[in-house]
Amino acid sequence: MLKPKRRHGTKRMTNADKVASVLRHDLRNKFSSILNAVTYVERSLEKMQLLERDPRIARFFELIGKELEAADRLLDQRAPARQRRTEKARVRE
């Protein structure tokens, strides 16, 4: 009698893993969009020499970059080991 419950539990876990994988992938796409926008704004401000006038602005850009990297690492740490490689491979494609 325990086997059907295990199978059902395993199926739920597999579905939950799939949902989590899609969520991690979607979040990484959002992070990439944010990083691209931040890079564009930062370069625009460099051209206008605004970063030189206020060094706090450059520190904010550094903070944004570090936080996006930390969020990406957090997503990777939360992924089951078997999914870490496949998700990264899919993102690179």
Image (tube, rainbow, N blue to C red):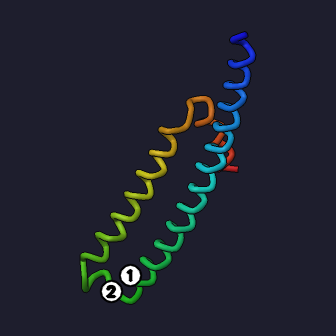
For the point 48% across and 50% down, the residue is 72
Viewer-closest of 50 and 5: 5
Reply above or below: 93 against 53. above
Reply above or below: 25 against 34. above
For the point 25% across and 76% down, the residue is 56
Residue 53 at what x, y percent from top left? 25, 86
Horizontal side, residue 68 vs residue 92: left or right = left
Q: Element at badge 1?
A: helix
Residue 27, by quadrant, is: bottom right
For the point 70% across and 37% down, the residue is 15
Determine which of the numbered discs, if any, sits on residue 46 in the image.
1
Determine which of the numbered discs, if any, sits on residue 50 in the image.
2
Residue 86 at what x, y percent from top left? 66, 37
For the point 57% across and 55% down, the residue is 28
Report crowding for label 2: few under 14, some 14 to 19, many 20 or more residues within 10 A (C-alpha). some
Report crowding for label 1: few under 14, some 14 to 19, many 20 or more residues within 10 A (C-alpha). few
